[in-house]
Image (spheres, grey):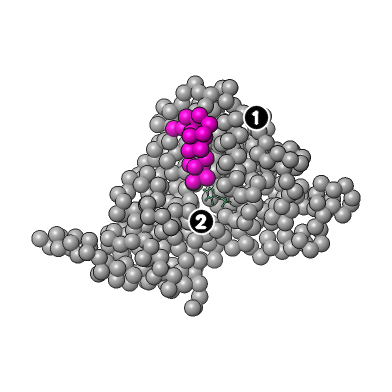
Amino acid sequence: MGKMIYLDNAATTKTAPEVVEAMLPYFTEMYGNPSSIYDFASKSKEGVTKARGQIADALGAKREEIYFTAGGSEADNWALKATFEAYKSKGNHIITTKIEHHAILHTCEYLEKERGAKITYVDVDENGIVKLDELEKAITPETILISVMFANNEIGSIQPIKEIGAIAKEHGILFHTDAVQAFGQVPINVDELGIDMLSSSGHKLNGPKGIGFLYIRKGVKIRSFVHGGAQERKRRAGTENVPGIVGYGAAAERAIRTMEERTAKEIQVRDHFIDRIMKEIPYVKLNGHPTKRLPNNVNVSFQFIEGESMLLMLDNYGVCASSGSACTSGSLDPSHVLLAIGLPHEIAHGSLRMTLSEETTMEDADFVVDKLKEIVSGLRAMSPLYEDFIKKQKN
Ligand SMILES: *Cc1c(COP(=O)(O)O)cnc(C)c1O
């Protein structure tokens, strides 16, 4: 196989060399338990403290508002379950959207089925942007939490977070956002945006896997997620993943430092990708908002073909992409996100997600689009649906 072109950065990213370098000494030399009292252990503790500061700075938050977790899914679970527990005397109603990650949706289903929560799933428009009027109308005196993702992992749409923060504040409701895809890709300041809780994950921004955090604004009542030792201000027990935390801190610092240049380059390649596909391949549709979208997200539906077939053929050329979110591959249902923006099943099935990195070049984009043109016309030539369509066109 020749060169690999990795276009699945929404699924996970390469750990940056400088991040690996920052982590290494915490495996080999500074392996002490941060809770121990001898001087040797204080080195590990310093590593954790520094990383907490790097992450807090990246969000305009305070150090003591950052709680490390084992990833984005855990942070999402924690935010929803603990808020539900802590605020149940006020009410049992949570508002979220139809396009959330399964870490949110399945937690909501659990709360609904097992814990007596009421959940409202607000609609999005055809570009995947949450309908603010519907969201505001859904608020009742029982509403304790609004949870809306910052940016969608499949179609890249960036939500009106500041407006949602203002609505939540006006009604005295907590606001949580799953920012796993957005952190490091768009500027985030929790105070300016009115965010009370925010979930994030290291491996989506060139950090290590299995580490994430939940930002919890000071004053929010929150229950412990893991009971045990006194780590994370007694809210999330367990010996810290010191190398992971240090790596995450370094990745967050790097993401903020490189954001402007990196995302400007990604946007250029992304728009080139989109322009060429839309101009050179017939019967295609861009999914997600044309401009309010993540700098690295391309999501397109090709009529008359299966996304899975495209993926396999792209894989033969060393191109890694996705036909939906990684979690839904293996199932035959089309993505809930594509259905929520109103795509019919057959069109949702022909969708392809390509998520770029700073290493993706214009040449990569040209290579992939050239191959896509061949693949799409080859698959359509074998498609009875396409044949019918063309016959009807001619009549
Ligand atoms: C990847 C992802 C998650 C889950 O994060 P993990 O660290 O893999 O558990 C949650 N939400 C969104 C939007 C994601 O993209």
Circle 1: is it few (<14), some (14-19), or many (20+) Cα within 10 Å?
few
Q: Which quadrant would residue 367 be assigned to in this image? A: bottom left
In magenta stretch: residue 103: yes
Q: How many numbered callouts?
A: 2
- Seen in the picture, residue 381 relative to 47 is either above or below; the reply is below
Tell me if the residue at label 2 has its CB under 8 Å from ligand 1. yes
Magenta segment, which residues? 101-120
* Front position in the image: 367 or 32: 32
Mark 2 and mark 1: Cα distance apart in space: 32 Å
The dominant secondary structure in magenta is helix
| Residue at 15% in and 60% down | 393
Query: To which quarter of the image does residue 330 belong?
Result: bottom left
Choose mark 2 or mark 1, whichever is in front: 1
Amino acid identity at mark 2: Ala
Q: Mark 2 points at which residue?
A: 10
Residue at image point 37% right, 57% down? 351
The numbered dot on residue 254 is none
Residue 20, above or below 63: below
Element carrying mark 1: loop
User: Where is residue 81 drawn, in percent x and y?
Assistant: 58, 35
The image shows residue 13 at horizontal and vertical percentages of 57, 60
User: From this viewpoint, which residue is outermost toward the left?
Assistant: 395
Residue 366, image x and y in percent? 41, 70
- The residue pinned by badge 1 equals 221
Q: Is residue 57 above or below residue 1?
A: above
Q: Is residue 320 left or right of residue 394?
A: right
Q: Mark 2 packing: few (<14 Cα in 10 Å), some, or many (20+)? A: many
The answer to whether 284 appears left or right of 368 in the picture is left
Residue furthest bottom in the image: 1
